[in-house]
Image (cartoon, helix red, strand yellow):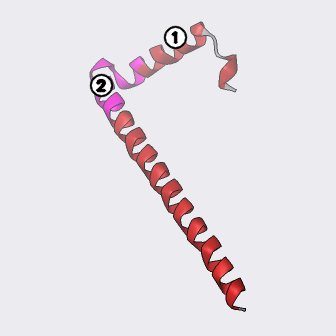
């Protein structure tokens, strides 16, 4: 969908954003967007780390229970 955008399309979108939000508000908007992206990336990284830990321990638990049976 976004692959069909040319340089002119992006220029028009930027102009509309400038009209809607105004130039003074854009640095704050960019700052909050960057902060949101950092939070999102750290949450995804944390979820991946939590997802790998139980799978490793569950494989050892299942092998232990099969040995005792």
In this rendering, position of residue 9 left or right of residue 16:
right
Q: Position of residue 6 (x, y in %)?
A: 63, 11
Residue 28 quadrant: top left
Q: Which residue is mark 1?
A: 11
Q: Position of residue 54 (x, y in %)?
A: 55, 68
Q: Quadrant of the C terminus?
A: bottom right
Q: CA distance from mark 1 to mark 2?
A: 18 Å
Q: Nearer the viewer, residue 47 or 57?
A: 57
Task: Report crowding for label 1: few under 14, some 14 to 19, many 20 or more residues within 10 A (C-alpha).
Answer: few
Can you say whether 32 is above or below 64 in the image?
above
**Residue projecting furthest to the bottom:** 69
Q: For numbered disc 2, what is the local secondary structure?
A: helix
Q: Which residue is mark 2?
A: 27
Range drawn in magenta: 18-31
Q: Say which residue appears at 55% left-offset and 61% top-offset.
A: 51
**Residue projecting furthest to the top:** 8
Task: Report crowding for label 2: few under 14, some 14 to 19, many 20 or more residues within 10 A (C-alpha).
Answer: few
Q: Nearer the viewer, residue 49 or 65?
A: 65
Q: Nearer the viewer, residue 66 or 23?
A: 66
Q: Nearer the viewer, residue 37 or 13?
A: 37
Q: Is residue 19 magenta?
A: yes
- The earlier-in-sequence mark between 1 and 2 is 1
Q: Position of residue 2 (x, y in %)?
A: 65, 24
Q: Is residue 67 magenta?
A: no
Can you say whether 31 is above or below 45 in the image?
above
């Amino acid at each position: 969908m976004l692959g069909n955008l040319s340089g002119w399309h992006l220029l028009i979108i930027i102009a509309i954003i400038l009209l809607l939000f105004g130039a003074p508000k854009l640095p704050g908007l960019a700052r909050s967007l960057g902060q949101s992206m950092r939070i999102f990336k750290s949450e995804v990284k944390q979820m991946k780390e939590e997802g790998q830990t139980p799978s490793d321990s569950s494989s050892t638990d299942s092998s232990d229970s099969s040995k005792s049976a």
